Amino acid sequence: MATLGSISLQVAFFLSIAGLFVAVYARKQSREDLMEAANRIVIGISLLITVGVIALLRELLLSNFQIEYVAQYTSRNTPWNYKITALWAGQDGSLLFWSWLLSIYAVVAVIQNRKRNLNLLPYAIATILVVQLFFLILNNFIANPFQPVPPGFTIPDGQGLNPQLQNPGMMIHPPMLYLGYIGFTIPFAFAMSAMLTGKLDNLWITSTRRWTLFAWLCLSIGITLGGKWAYVELGWGGYWAWDPVENASFMPWLTGTAFLHSVIIQEKKNMLRVWNMVLIMLTFFLSIFGTFLTRSGVISSVHSFTASSIGPFFSGFLVIIILSSIALLIWRMDVLKTRNQLESLTSRESSFLLNNLIFIAICFSVLWGTMFPLVSEAVRGAKITVGPPFFSQVNVPIGLLLLFLTGVGPLLAWRRTSFESFKRNFMVPVILAFVSAPVFWLLGVRSLYPFVSAVLIIFVGSSIIQEFWKGMTARHRMTGENYVRALVNMTLKNKSRFGGYIVHLAIVFYFIGFTGSAFNVEVEKTLQPGEALEAGMFSFVYTDHQQLNRPNHVAQIVELEILKDGESYGKLYPEKRMYFRSNQPNTEVDILQTWREDLYATLAGVSGENNAATIRIFVNPLVQWIWIGGAILAFGTIIAMLPTKPRIVTEKSK
Amino acid sequence: MTGKQKKFLISGLVIAAALVLIIATGFQGNQVFYVTVDELYAKAPDLYGERIRMAGNVKEGSIQKSENQLFTRFKMVQEGKDLPIEYEGITPDMFKDGAEVIVEGTYTKSGVFKADNLMAKCASRYEGDVTDTEAMGNYKEEQGY
């Protein structure tokens, strides 16, 4: 099977070269038969890579330790579901996985556009195939997952998958990120095609709108799940550490979000056409760059891979992307430019522009902070890093400005906002914000950023709810439908608008969670049995200790009784495991989650005759809101992605 | 240029300048020097009190812990050179003999590096676990990993 896999990847490589030429030639000669041939080649490539993936999966499931990758990432008694996830656990497998997902995306894009988009499709296919070719070069020649172990070695059992990665979150998190990263290839490809063909109207944007949303959704879910995994598995009580690998996924998300907003202006006002090109190019570039950062170990990070051979290839590819993007932009600049001008500072357009400026600023600061060690070493000869304090100090105020805009932007009218509509739209949210301010102050929210954030959350949250309320009551009056029905129908009638608002609401939920982190409490203490530890409003009494011998490890388990105002509030059972074979300790966190706060306990160890337990407790307010926000975000984006069928007819009749 | 365009240009520039200012000031006081053990010894007097980040491996057999586990002393090796390190706090799971670690803290006149942040290289390189790792271990040694 391994041989078959290798061969199909090789054939896929040659076929991509062929497909590239066929697609370009077909477009140049306007030959529909050749275009169809290019479409079929895309499907063929996908089938071949699928064979490769199936072959690797088969070897993983059957534990063929003749193959180095299989021996490195699985062992005979790795559970079958984690044998499958081993497909993307290591570098070689994950690059094959990348290739495979891209080829599937390409097939879907072809099927979607082969009838209706003959003009743009061939060059879009050509662009996709260039990207595909790059990954196939890696799959075949640089990071081949079918590499056998060196001759003379027989390996009775493999190394196994790291237990920290044997977690359901880890099964979904990497594929989600990948689906996001790779998804941006399709809008990028259509953008490139628009540039090459000179068809620079809005067609490339409208025909890839849902692709962008889908990629953005997957990236958002991937990032959120990554945070959730770190939170429940790593035991340091947080979900985001501004690690280079995390930043790598955050940057395309930022430019992608900016893109999602600014294309609306192009669709409505035919402005920002150059800017949108730049944004999609940046987003694609950052997606590849993110894959590169994660996989190359250029920047030392706690999870990045040790230095590997793929670095130079990725750098070369990134340079090609930049140069060709810039060249195309310069070539088409005259056609891209538009005469439309902004009319007023208090218009929806200018709030979108500001939003874009802010997203780019955040992205730039994250990029700068991440790359700073490399830059400073090159410029000053000293390697200087900036840690989480830098990122927080910079991004908290900018983020709050962004939150403010989330509330203001949607309420501003296109072109210019009259004072009347200003008053009408902002009255309720502003009043609520002013009323909430002293309440927060009395509740003890007194440092600057958390206070501003809390008030803004009220302002933005109420402005979004007001939009839904207005729409719902208006529809109720007009149609006589009951309120629930009116709400649903109104949302479905204007999916992208209200889907967007739901996503905004989700962002408010995220900010509620982020604001909570300003009030985190962390206490570390060694307790004798019966002693208690105080953290925030809670006390944790060490009531019991157990040592359990399980098949592959021995676990120290500590029982903590939680008291709030002297009353029992629940129990926590943090564990410390020691795995026999590797002599590797593993901390199992225990968390009591409520909507108010998470009580998060880790056990550092048990020692002495009395079994004194060293415990770390975190009281993290409002963390749950982030995960709920993630679900709302997914819901809103899916609403915005739902197809709008009968619109054409109704719009004409208006 | 019309008056309106000027207004836009100016407000745009003001906002951009503010953002640049926020980013630039973010660097003040948040810089951490990344040095090797060699560089640390060579530049020592200048580096006292500066925030420093270093990477290396835990020297075999050098880990000492206080009874309550909250205070750790160990030596970090980098290219054959040792550096004594003291760390206050709970050590991560991956922290053990030979592990790759990153420490952050300050270098003191006593020649001890006081770390307040200790990270051990995690996950992605998948050191074997749970199961028969001996076989693979031998294999790795012979491969010169």
Image (cartoon, coloured by chain):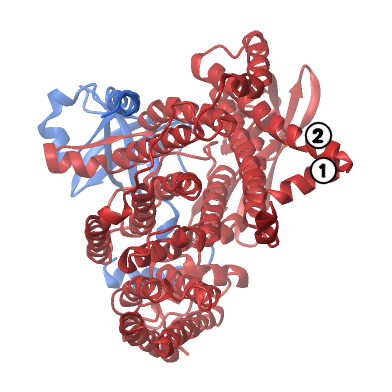
Chain colours: A red, B blue
User: What is the quadrant of residue A227 in the picture?
Assistant: top right
Q: CA distance from mark 2 to mark 1?
A: 8 Å
Tell me which residue sits at (38%, 37%) in the image. Answer: A341
Q: Are marks 2 and 1 in contact (CB under 8 Å)?
A: yes
What kind of element bears circle 1? helix
User: What is the quadrant of residue A604 in the picture?
Assistant: top right
Above/below status of A76 relative to A252: below
Residue A574 visible (yes or no): no
What kind of element bears circle 2? helix
Q: Nearer the viewer, residue A234 or A616?
A: A234
Q: Tag 1: residue type?
A: Ala
Tell me which residue sits at (35%, 77%) in the image. Answer: A136
Relative placement, left or right, of A224 versus A306 is: right
Pinpoint the chain carrying mark 1: A
Which mark is on residue A388?
A: none
Relative placement, left or right, of A601 versus A319 is: right
Q: How many marks?
A: 2
Which mark is on residue A473?
A: 2
> Mark 1 highlights which residue?
A486
Relative placement, left or right, of A24 versus A180 is: left
